[in-house]
Image: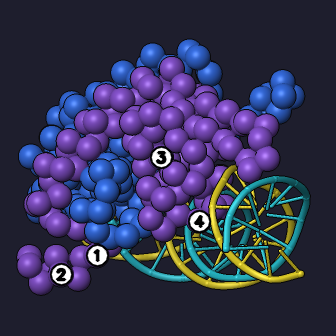
Chain colours: A blue, B purple, C cyan, D yellow
Amino acid sequence: MAKLPHSRFDCSPGCSVEAAISLIDGKWKCVVLFHLLDGTLRFNEIRRRAPGVTQRMLTNQLRELEEDGLITRKVYAQVPPKVEYSLSDMGRGLTPILLALKDWGDANIGLFGKPRQVSDTAEAAA
Amino acid sequence: MAKLPHSRFDCSPGCSVEAAISLIDGKWKCVVLFHLLDGTLRFNEIRRRAPGVTQRMLTNQLRELEEDGLITRKVYAQVPPKVEYSLSDMGRGLTPILLALKDWGDANIGLFGKPRQVSDTAEAAA
DNA sequence: GCCTATAGTGTCGAAAAGGATACCGTCATG
DNA sequence: CATGACGGTATCCTTTTCGACACTATAGGC
């Protein structure tokens, strides 16, 4: 998603849900946010915790999260560059969502093993 | 998102978060799910509650939600077709997530008014 | 002099998501 | 007979996303 269908949120009760989702959506954002719950991390630390993410993608996601005010970027004017990312107050407010997400995921992963996209076996079963 | 980066969820603590997000992602899924919290709805009822969604999109999202086991589709063999959608047990388990999402959205909408994409005015305000 | 690490940026192209539109069959209504 | 409601499908096309890869600058180690 990430694109809002109407750019207004006072239309129906689902809208604020959408608004919230639109901010934590993006292939890696939720993962980044989740890892930042543990505390401040440097660029490459996040990278290492999210196996498979490319620099470009990570940079992108971090920039968007920063623009949205969910994280804080702190650059140290050192020569081997050092940049630290941490949750902003607003981002920290996402904690219950992230935890609910994790709880549900943990509880339900066993039920389907993998999601839809890996439906090769599902097709065979169907 | 919707695409899983590794299709395995036992790799790191963020993975179950991803897994959960991947299921409720999709431009309209969260909205549909949210409205279904109120109870069973028919196709066009959902359509009316989600201003702007097209049949194709709605059908799509509903199918995916069904494949993922989050909702139940009940077709009545009537002549004016009647199809009812409701949350499955697993889908109902998403309630805390959806509510947390809504709470956060409600609490923070006032802070930025609109998300990033409509940032023309946000820039002016900033 | 070369390699490494740091935190990026730029460009390209494939793939996927999403929107618009038209169409289906059946029944009831006017 | 034409129209509308119902719950979709099929097709086309545009936009967005994402991954691969190359490139940057500087300092330190070998």
Query: Do the residues bearing badges 4 and 3 touch, measured as CB atoms within 8 Å?
Result: no
- Label 3: few (<14), some or many (≥20) within 10 Å? many
Gap between marks 4 and 3 measured at Cα: 13 Å
Q: Earlier in the sequence, mark 4 or mark 2?
A: 4
Q: Is residue A57 visible?
A: no
Q: Return the chain for callout 4.
A: B
Q: Return the chain for callout 2.
A: B
Quarter of the C terminus of chain B within the rendering? bottom left
Q: Which amino acid type is marked by label 2?
A: Thr
Element marked by disc 2: helix
Which residue is tagged 4?
B54
Q: Earlier in the sequence, mark 4 or mark 3?
A: 3
Q: Choose mark 4 or mark 1, whichever is in front.
A: 4
Question: Which residue is nearer to you in this view: B123 or B57?
Answer: B57
Image height of C23 relative to A36, above or below: below
Gap between marks 3 and 2 measured at Cα: 29 Å
Residue A67 placement (x, y as % from top left): 22, 65
Which residue is tagged 1?
B118
Q: Earlier in the sequence, mark 3 or mark 2?
A: 3
Q: Return the chain for callout 3.
A: B
Which residue is tagged 3?
B32
Question: Which residue is nearer to you in this view: A111 or A35?
Answer: A111
Q: Which amino acid type is marked by label 3?
A: Val
Q: Is residue B8 left or right of residue C25?
A: left
Q: Choose mark 4 or mark 2, whichever is in front.
A: 4
Image height of B15 relative to B61, above or below: above
Which residue is tagged 2?
B121
- Label 2: few (<14), some or many (≥20) within 10 Å? few
Residue C15 placement (x, y as % from top left): 71, 59
Q: Earlier in the sequence, mark 4 or mark 1?
A: 4
